[in-house]
Image: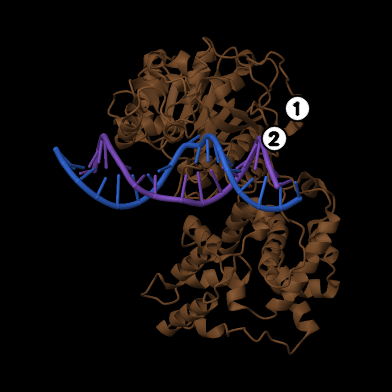
Chain colours: A brown, B purple, C blue
Amino acid sequence: MDKNLSGEDNDDIDWDTEDELEIQEIQDTVFSSCTDLRTTGQHVVCCDGEASSSSVPFRSKFIQQFVVMGFPEESIAKAIEQNGENSDLVLDSLLTFKALDDSPEEQPSVSPPLEPSISSDDSASEYNKNVLDNVYEDDSWSSDSDNYINTVKQCYLNDEGSSLSEKEKMLLFLGNMGYPAEEASIAMDRCGPKASLPELVDFICAAQMSRAEDPYLLEDVKPNLKDILNDCGGYKKRKMYNELCKRKKQREISVEETIRLPKPMIGFGIPTESVPRMVQRILPEKIIGPPYFYYENVALAPKGVWDTIKRHLYEIEPEFVDSKYFSATARKRGYLHNLPIENRFPLFPLPPRTIHEALPLSKRWWPSWDTRSKLNCLQTAIGSARLTDKIRKAVEKYDGEPPMEIQKYVLYHCKKWNLVWVGRNKVAPLEPDEVEMLLGFPKNHTRGGGISRTDRYKSLGNSFQVDTVAYHLSVLRDLFPNGINVLSLFSGIGGAEVALYRLGVPLNNVVSVEKSEVNRNIVRSWWEQTNQRGNLIHFDDVQLLSRDQLKKLIESVGGFDLVIGGSPCNNLAGSNRVSRDGLEGRESSLFFDYVRILDDVKSIMSRHR
DNA sequence: CCTACTATGAAATAGTAA
DNA sequence: TTACTATTTCATAGTAGG
């Protein structure tokens, strides 16, 4: 598993690899200042506690980080004078000083001039295009690089009206700071056209923190804009960075901590285990609820995603649980929360735990060579009719057991699409009501009320497995015998609400934030059908839920006891072939709104006490 | 517009054998 | 260790038809 993460010295291509290190180094240092750039003031979660609680004044600490790197103090002072207390800019200047100091006349021969590209006629774009084409003439680039060059080209050449738009200039600038064009472009798309430089840097940092410590990425050959444009002293800087990285590696011997999934994926314990191996965990005083919070997302996210999530949620250890230990269907998810984990209890009645129990009618048609006892993860799309037809034709040619090859083919697709046997030689996708049952929802929960069948699959596929979540939330029943106030973000079809209700936790006030109207209707309808006595307040968009609104809500309901939600997994899920972009993806980056809202709720509530 | 249907791999992980 | 195999995955985009 562990590939070569020690930076061995291969001079041929290693400069690319080292370049990634270079970026890491920048980000490591920049990040400490990123939190300071935040204007909201309450975002202290991603700072390490020591730094903020230390009595060392900020300024000296700021200087010290460069002293540790081995820069002379006068250079540091000069760099700070030029750039202010912005780590990345200061570091950039320092390295430029150093590079120029070492060899005043030496300029890399391949360095193209930067200035012409800032002019504002079409030749500039043409020039960049040529440069980029030339760079990519080299066939040592991997296909990854091909994708990358397309991104870069698009960044430069998209807007034909103005050859160098504001966006392009900003891209150039970020590129010069050492950020990959791809990331910079995403950041600018996400932050909008009016975003300031600190905002963009902050975004890129947040998005990239995960990858900064990702050992695999060291092999990933991705050039960045800085190298394409090769600014002043770039070569020397690179060398400097290499040394810095080595020094840093020597300093930090043990860090390299990536989150690992537990081998039986049972989190802090499951109810059916004969020997409950409950784990003791001690949370810092500050983060013990109320408000309690509960965050959920896919367990098998791209590398580093869960590290980032953890970092933004108080460094609490997530618990990874596969719902196959609760029901007949697998669902590998990570749950990060500050709930107590002692004295949990499961939801009753216990759901069926095997396919045969869950779908008794299928037993009759189930061939012996299909040895599945659990279904795979229920997703948002179902298998095609054409596929089930092909399977039928493939199987019905044989009287008894089909040959191994056929079995293999059929099983592969049955597992991939969660097909079940519904007749002689006939397989089919699950019906929506079967999915409801497997996920722990009442029958017809998503049925009717103007939702299409396709959307039922979609909403269900994006939902909680109720029994699993309820097991974790069960501790709330005794904590809040008089009921709780819930802030439910990304509510979907109300998995959290259903879980609490089925646990017997009275719901006093539920503020539910959900973008999809049909989903809101489903929850509203369920709320009325179950004769809830509390209040259900709906909101549309988490991004529009401001601190002021939260303050008013908290005042009117008397504070939230639970903030619960699973942010979009679109850009994290393995089934996404198109835009598995990680936490910075278009939808999945809404995770940062979860963090923002949770922080706001905590700070508003602590002020009221 | 809505709805249903279909084609579309890669990344991450664990396990195993060399 | 390293290289190979096996398994799994809260999805998107395009098309056709109403």
Q: Which residue is mark 2?
A: A317
Q: Quadrant of residue A160?
A: bottom left
Q: Nearer the viewer, residue A457 or A122?
A: A457
Question: Can you name the residue that lies furthest to the top here?
Answer: A349
Residue pointed to by mark 1: A281
Please state which of residues A448 and A423 is positioned toward the viewer in this rendering.
A423
| Residue beneath the point at 29% across and 25% down | A449
Q: Is residue A505 above or below residue A259?
A: above
**Residue at the (62%, 84%) spot, across then down:** A110
Tell me the crowding category of disc 1: few under 14, some 14 to 19, or many 20 or more residues within 10 angstroms, Cα based. few
Disc 2 and disc 1: Cα gap in Å? 9 Å
Subunit under mark 2: A
Q: Nearer the viewer, residue A346 or A41?
A: A346
Q: Secondary structure at mark 1?
A: loop
Does residue A113 appear left or right of residue A125 in this picture?
A: right
- Indicate whether A366 appears above or below A104: above
Q: Where's residue A342, x and y in %?
A: 70, 18
Q: Which of A153/A101 is in front?
A: A153
x and y percent of residue C8 in the render? 52, 34
Say whether marks 2 and 1 touch (CB < 8 Å). yes
Secondary structure under badge 2?
loop
Residue A520 percent coordinates (x, y) = 38, 30
Q: What amino acid is labelled 1 in the image?
A: Arg
Is tag 2's residue or tag 1's residue first in the polypeptide sequence? 1
Residues tagged by mark 2 and mark 1 found on one chain of the structure: yes
Q: Position of residue A482 (x, y in %)?
A: 57, 13
Residue A309 visible in the snapshot: yes
Q: Is residue A38 visible?
A: no
Amino acid of disc 2: Glu
